[in-house]
Image: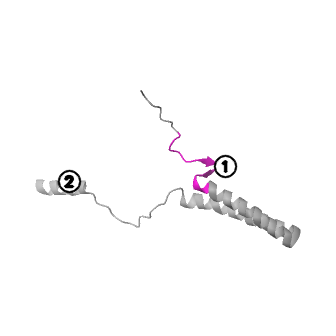
Amino acid sequence: MSYFLYKGLKKPLVFFGLKDKYIYYALAAIVGGFIVVIILNSLLDFLGTMIGICITGASIWTIFYLQDKKGLYSKTVNKNEIHIYPKQFKRIRNEKENI
């Protein structure tokens, strides 16, 4: 008996260009922005609505920017570090013995 492996199983969820965790961040920004628009609309009328919409748009733009800058997974920065693995030691040792 064989089982089929679905090709899209390990791919991240994509929605309007946002991937995985950034979809939830954008959803939170939209819901939070909606609440801010309601509050500012009751305090400042039309001006408050425009300010709230600008804040919501800026937060969504920031989420797209963060996705492009940081990516989906945590990345470590390699600052000119040299990593030597044991296989390289054996090769260097063998070259010295042949000389």
Q: Earlier in the sequence, mark 1 or mark 2?
A: 1
Q: Amino acid at mark 1?
A: Phe
The location of residue 86, given as percent across then percent down, is: 24, 57
Q: Which mark is residue 16?
A: 1
Q: Is residue 15 magenta?
A: yes
Left/right placement of residue 27 relative to residue 41 reads: left
User: Who's the residue at 47% across and 60% down the image?
Assistant: 75
Q: What span is in magenta?
A: 8-22
The location of residue 69, given as percent across then percent down, is: 56, 61
Q: Which mark is residue 5?
A: none
User: Who's the residue at 55% across and 48% down the image?
Assistant: 12
- The crowding category of the residue bearing disc 1, from other C-alpha atoms within 10 Å (few below 14, some 14 to 19, many at least 20), is few
For label 2, the residue is 91
Q: Say if residue 34 shows up in the picture.
A: yes
Majority secondary structure of magenta residues? loop
User: Who's the residue at 33% across and 63% down the image?
Assistant: 82
Q: Say if residue 99 shows up in the picture.
A: no
Q: Determine the image quadrant of residue 44.
A: bottom right
Outermost front residue: 1
- The crowding category of the residue bearing disc 2, from other C-alpha atoms within 10 Å (few below 14, some 14 to 19, many at least 20), is few
The location of residue 85, given as percent across then percent down, is: 27, 57
